Image (spheres, helix red, strand yellow):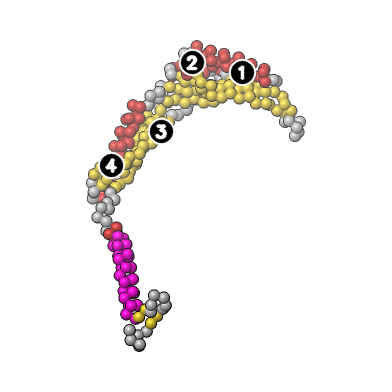
Amino acid sequence: MSENEPTIGRGAGPLTLPRIIAVVAAAGLLAGIIVGPLMSGRSTLAADPTATTPEHTVAVTGMADVSVAPDVADIVIGVMVQKSTVSAAQSAAATSMSAVIAALKKDGVDDKDIVTVNLSLNPVYDYSNGSTPRLVGQQFSNTVKVTVRNLKTVSAVIDDAIAAGATTLSGISFRLNDPKQAQAQARALAVADAKAKADALAAAAGVSIKGVASITETTIQTSPVPVAYSLDAAGKAASTPVQAGTTDIVVQVSISYLIG
């Protein structure tokens, strides 16, 4: 080393300018070796030849409504009794409901088609004396849902239950005991409706249907509730007229078709 060569640092020996240049060059080479694969990996990922192109689809909704005659009626019938004590109210309600159930069975309703849906006991207060309520009795309610499988007997079932002691008639609804056939018919019509819409859209766009990507279905069963209960001019209970109407099976399908 000549006297005029600069030196830097201490320890293992002075670093001359040529040695500094050599160290920097080696560090740059190492950094290139480490960073190079990382940059290369990102570039390769961006141009991954295995990436798939999304399918082109058209999504439509089809709907169908099939009306059929119902074959089952569900009626909610109950007794409500008010007495001065709990035991008196419970006993009177039990007597009345036993008579109602006997009348239902007499009209051909099976045991399995009589289901208790509500039992309640509530105190009854008199609020007429200002802000201090006065207990005046107990109210006991017993309600059953009755399934009538012979629609010709619906009126008789209602009338006989009321004659036997029923005091509440909460509602009636009609339905199909087995809706599978009507649902299958509505489903086929809904899919045909969706396919016709998809074909029209594809033709308008200058493409064609290639297949189905997905299908979802929603099924709805609706039934009108035409119920009437009336008294004749003398105040005597007339036979209850009941109209079963029709039950509507509505199926909606959402289908995504592949196009190309």
Which tag, 4 or 1, sits closer to the chain's start?
1
- Sequence order check: which comes first, mark 2 or mark 3? 2
Badge number at residue 111? 2
Q: Main secondary structure of the magenta part?
A: helix
Crowding around mark 3 (Cα neighbors within 10 Å: few <14, some 14 to 19, many 20+) is few
SS type, badge 4: strand
Q: Secondary structure at mark 3?
A: strand
In the drawing, what numbered circle is on residue 212?
A: 4
Mark 4: few/some/many CA within 10 Å (<14, 14-19, 20+)? some
**Residue at the outermost bottom position:** 4
Q: Which residue is mark 3?
A: 220
Q: Disc 3 and disc 1: Cα gap in Å?
A: 37 Å
Q: Which residue was labeled with disc 1?
A: 93
Closer to the observer: label 1 or label 2? Answer: 2
Q: Is residue 164 above or below residue 32?
A: above
Residue 126, position as x, y percentages in the image: 72, 28
- 195 left or right of 250 in image: left
Residue at 33%, 84% (x, y): give it. 1
Magenta span: 17-43
